[in-house]
Image: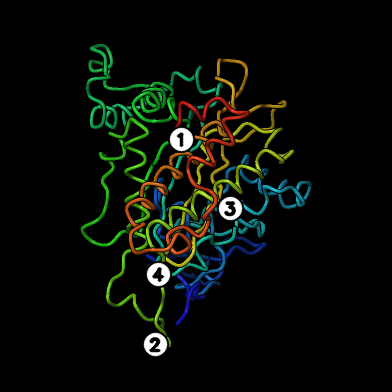
């Protein structure tokens, strides 16, 4: 009987024919760079499997270069290599060059595949912080008809008569509206998407867009824990025929909560975090019923800044992003889910089986933090 099996994830990749770049240009024989499809939110084509990796178990993946994000990965791998936050950020393996089908050069950041050690994982993407736009984006007036269509689909009542006539809005207008109509402003985080759910259990974009409260969020977190612990007949045995033990939903929720607490401690101790503004970054929560991972990703809007608290309210000019305040509320949400599941499953289940963290109940965690953080009282 195994717990914590080292079985790897299974991914499906769509071939994209490209050429390896050489000093003389894009003239090498075409090779297959494939789309990495286990993406919970964002653009599915932005993460790809390198042609030199095993398709079904890549140790690294490729992401199109953004110069700010490249600088973040480079700094964490060199100047901040001993910073406590490094363990939560994908490992950096340099920059790869390749070509598209027209011969144009493409540059990719090669980073560690965070899902490599998981078996058919459930993945949740949670946007972190009190806003999703840079201060510089407040001044942009570029018309975006595509964002008008998205607004009209998700938040039709938000559009003004003038915007309906013009049939476009700005990116800042869209992001501000989306932040207002989600949990970003109130809680400092927003669930953006999930992946890996069983057929018939998928969650729509419209459902995520409708989430407004802590109760909505807790329901989403609970569903994730239950989905991660769900057992299909074919998942009962490993490749060698060994019976696989799966965690209970309560254990999954407790493990996520504990991982978030570890991330919180690392952020507070990190000089790298203190000196940067983080807009649009996400937490990737991964669980397969046997293990749990929490990772910090997406740093395209993470410029170096002065010392920030990451907690106080944002106003134009102070660059505060609210990532610590949001993380603290997210911890409370997972603590609440853990305690609810613990209560429901307590009969006939030992506390150790239900929640390996044991001592870190919701009341104890939020209670101890409330001694020095007033937000926990309102959160809990």
* Circle 2 residue: 241
Mark 4: give few (<14), some (14-19) or many (20+) Cα within 10 Å.
Answer: many
Between the residue at mark 2 and the residue at mark 3, the CA separation in whole angstroms equals 42 Å
- The image quadrant where one finds the N terminus is bottom left
**Is tag 3's residue or tag 1's residue first in the polypeptide sequence?**
3
Camera-nearest label, 4 or 2: 4
Camera-nearest label, 3 or 4: 4
* Circle 1 residue: 189
Between the residue at mark 4 and the residue at mark 2, the CA separation in whole angstroms equals 15 Å
Residue beneath the point at 33% across and 35% down: 215
- Rendering coords of residue 36 (x, y %): 43, 61
* Circle 4 residue: 246
**Is tag 4's residue or tag 2's residue first in the polypeptide sequence?**
2
Residue beneath the point at 39% across and 21% down: 173
Q: Which mark is residue 120?
A: none
**Which quadrant of the view contains residue 165?**
top left
As drawn, is 146 to the left or to the right of 127? left
310, 109: nearer the viewer? 310
133, 341: nearer the viewer? 341
Q: Secondary structure at mark 3?
A: strand
**Is tag 1's residue or tag 4's residue first in the polypeptide sequence?**
1
**Which quadrant of the view contains residue 307?**
top right
Camera-nearest label, 3 or 1: 1
Residues under numbered marks 3 and 4 in contact, where contact means CB atoms less than 8 Å apart? no
**Is tag 2's residue or tag 3's residue first in the polypeptide sequence?**
3
Residue beneath the point at 65% across and 27% down: 309
Mark 1: give few (<14), some (14-19) or many (20+) Cα within 10 Å.
Answer: many
């Amino acid at each position: 009987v195994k717990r914590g099996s080292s079985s790897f994830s299974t991914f499906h990749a769509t071939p994209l024919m490209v050429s390896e770049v050489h000093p003389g240009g894009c003239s090498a024989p075409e090779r297959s760079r494939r789309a990495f499809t286990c993406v919970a939110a964002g653009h599915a084509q932005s993460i790809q499997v390198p042609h030199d990796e095993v398709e079904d178990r890549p140790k690294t993946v490729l992401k199109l270069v953004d110069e700010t994000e490249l600088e973040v990965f480079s700094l964490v791998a060199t100047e901040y290599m001993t910073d406590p936050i490094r363990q939560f950020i994908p490992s950096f393996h340099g920059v790869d060059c390749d070509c598209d089908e027209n011969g144009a050069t493409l540059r990719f950041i090669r980073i560690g595949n965070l899902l490599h050690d998981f078996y058919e994982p459930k993945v949740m993407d949670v946007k972190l912080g009190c806003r999703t736009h840079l201060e510089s984006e407040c001044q942009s007036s570029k018309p975006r008809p595509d964002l008008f269509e998205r607004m009209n689909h998700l938040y039709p009542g938000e559009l003004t008569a003038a915007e309906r006539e013009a049939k476009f809005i700005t990116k800042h207008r869209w992001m501000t509206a989306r932040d207002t109509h989600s949990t970003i402003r109130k809680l400092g985080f927003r669930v953006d998407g999930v992946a890996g759910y069983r057929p018939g259990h998928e969650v729509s974009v419209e459902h995520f867009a409708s989430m407004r409260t802590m109760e909505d969020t807790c329901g989403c977190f609970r569903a994730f824990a239950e989905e991660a612990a769900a057992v299909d007949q074919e998942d009962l045995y490993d490749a060698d025929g060994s019976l696989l033990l799966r965690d209970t939903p309560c254990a999954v929720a407790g493990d996520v909560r504990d991982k978030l607490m570890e991330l919180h401690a690392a952020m507070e101790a990190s000089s790298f975090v203190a000196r940067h503004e983080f807009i649009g970054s996400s937490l990737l929560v991964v669980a397969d019923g046997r293990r749990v991972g929490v990772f910090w990703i997406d740093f395209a809007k993470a410029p170096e800044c002065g010392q920030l608290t990451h907690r106080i309210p944002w106003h134009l000019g102070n660059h505060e992003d609210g990532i610590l305040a949001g993380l603290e509320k997210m911890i409370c949400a997972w603590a609440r889910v853990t305690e609810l599941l613990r209560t429901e499953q307590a009969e006939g289940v030992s506390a150790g089986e239900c929640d390996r963290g044991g001592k870190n109940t919701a009341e104890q965690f939020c209670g101890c933090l409330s001694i020095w953080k007033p937000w926990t009282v309102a959160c809990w």
